[in-house]
Image: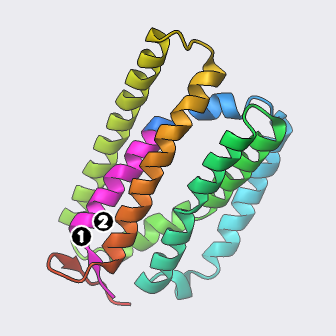
Amino acid sequence: MMIALRLYLAYKLLNSIFLGVSLGTIFTIYAPLNPKIYSLGGIALALGAFILSLFYSKLLNLKPYKKILLGLEILPFFYLFAYLLFPNTFFGALIVYTLYQIGFIFGDYLGRTETLLLPRKTILSHLDKRKQIGYLLGLVIAFIFYTILEFFGILQKESQIYAIHFLLLLLQCAVFLTLFSAFRQTRTNKWNPKT
């Protein structure tokens, strides 16, 4: 099984742009939640990540990485739609928080697997550069987006967060399609770690 490296690098860039754009939304989305929920979520996150680590010997290779990563990139569609359908409600915030926590459970696993599967330090360097550039671009895009909304008189933060979710939806489509293409690509410039 192979991965098209250029597309994978593009995926990392787009994924980080998504993260940068979405960063400021969480504070408004989570507003209806009771602080105790964060404690419960943290406990679930720690337990979930611990249980996942028990299976690393089977999961730390390309085939499960591909399946898990593609599955995790479907999660944002669910929490984007959850917020768009139930904006500024306890139910919507709880769904978004729960789905984020599920994604976070796999954070250590994804980082470890990517590092183990990559054959060269230069590729890791390129990945980290893409992540940082994407994150900065995402923050700038969000700032410009909110500035434009304010220019048009949309000043309420809930309305701004709702509007930016449509941009996030478009970004997530690009993220998922780029990742899917990176795994499907079979031409030149491939990364073929041992499966």
Mark sitting on residue 8? 2
Amino acid type, callout 1: Leu
Are circles 2 and 1 on residues that touch, CB within 8 Å? Answer: yes
Residue occupying the point 57% across, 23% down: 160
Q: Is residue 121 visible?
A: no
Residue occupying the point 76% across, 42% down: 92
The residue segment tinted magenta is 1-20
Q: Quadrant of residue 139?
A: top left
* Main secondary structure along the magenta-highlighted residues: helix
Query: In what quadrant of the picture does the C terminus appear?
Result: bottom left
Coloring scheme used: rainbow
Residue occupying the point 68% across, 55% down: 99
Q: Which residue is mark 1?
A: 5
Query: In what quadrant of the picture does the N terminus appear?
Result: bottom left
Residue occupying the point 61% across, 31% down: 162
Measured from the top left, where is residue 166 in percent x and y? 52, 39
